[in-house]
Amino acid sequence: MNLIEYFLSNNFSVKLLCLENPFQDKIIDSRLEIVELQNNIEKINYLKNLTGSLFFTTTPSIGTSIFPKSQIKPSSMIPKYIYLFHSLVSPNEMYVKNSFKNFDFIFSPSKTISEQIKNLVSNNTKIYETGYLLLDEIDVFKFNDRKRNKVLLAPTWGDGVKEISKNINKINEFAIKNELKLVFRPHPMTDIKSLKLNSEIIIDSNKDLSNLETYTNLITDFSGIALEFFYLTGRPVLFLDVTKKIKRKLKKKEKDLNLIENDMRNIIGKVTKIDDLTNFDISTLYAEEESRKFIESLNYSKSSLNQTVDIINKLIKQKQ
């Protein structure tokens, strides 16, 4: 919302395109035009006829049949397409082919991601390091002391979540043994009804970071929520040994990369098999000494909004 507030306060005309209104019944600035598209067909038609200066999205794969660029004439009315990262994991194995190729600009949260994405974009794409907007003006480990006797189970979407949901009773027993209340947060892409969870499992439907620090512990798989949780709290994460969501095979140039979502599992916490949870004492969970340096390296600037705005102003001047 901070980026939207910046545009509104500087008298920009802002449209928010969505399939579901993220603000629901909240009162939002009347200058913000919310376009709630009813289905994918309507979305595609709208995008093909889009005009404007800048188009920001956290959805990859612009320029594809399901996420087309504008075809409006003259071409000077077509916006520049900017990708904002919604996760701190690497842009390689967990994204489909050509996820970033057709963007005009990539606003990268870190030098690590900039390096890992440089061979995945076109020659015309420019990459800028801005920091991670979701962590704007938040110090590392700021919420270290805020916790309750709750543990959050928050896997990413894909094959891993199916394995986890089938064993959720084992995970719940582990939580009870450690005097914690288990809460499940599904990834926005997960169809929670299909998981057929025990009705006693508490569901956290939040899609942001607003209450993340209130959990004593986090259990996940390869999800980027682990990085956000650790950045906010400094509390180690318990990673489950389940199938990783792999959307494409790495290219030869990517083979030697240290993927963030792989490295984090042995730096900011510990990996365990679900069947081994019975004998696992969560009080023994710890992060490695280099964990703070690791997590700080993934956010280029604490003042990410200011970094982003500076670059936006330069882009607007170029387009005028």
Image (cartoon, rainbow, N blue to C red):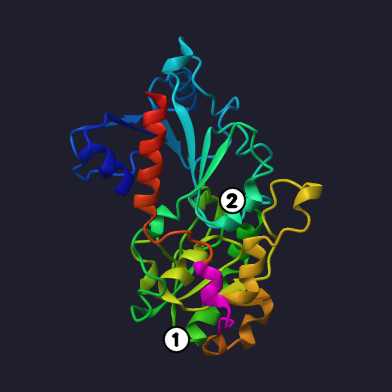
Q: Is mark 2 on a helix, strand or loop?
A: helix
Q: Give the image location of residue 148, x and y in percent.
A: 35, 79
Q: Which residue lies furthest to the right in this view?
A: 252
Disc nearer the start of the sequence (1/2) = 2
Q: Is mark 1 on a helix, strand or loop?
A: loop
Crowd tier of the residue under label 2, counting other residues whose Cα lies within 10 Å: few below 14, some 14–19, many 20 or above:
some
* Occupied quadrant, residue 52: top left
> Tag on residue 273?
none
Q: Which residue type carries mark 1? A: Glu
Q: Which of 267 and 26 is in front in this view?
A: 267
Residues at discs 1 and 2 in contact (Cβ within 8 Å): no
- The residue under the point 35% across, 44% down is 309
Residue 37 visible: no
Q: Which residue type carries mark 2? A: Ser
Q: Give the image location of residue 65, x and y in percent.
A: 60, 24
Q: What stretch is highlighted in magenta?
A: 286-296
Camera-near label (1 vs 2) is 2
The residue carrying mark 2 is 114
* Occupied quadrant, residue 232: bottom left
- The residue under the point 38% across, 26% down is 53
Relative to residue 217, is residue 68 depicted above or below? above
Q: Which of 110 and 87 is in front in this view?
A: 110
Question: In the rendered view of the protein, which quadrant contains the C terminus?
Answer: top left
Queried whether the magenta region covers residue 133, the answer comes back as: no
Crowd tier of the residue under label 1, counting other residues whose Cα lies within 10 Å: few below 14, some 14–19, many 20 or above:
few
> Spatial distance from mark 1 to mark 2, Cα to Cα?
42 Å
Left or right? Give the position of 105 relative to 144.
Answer: right
The residue carrying mark 1 is 179
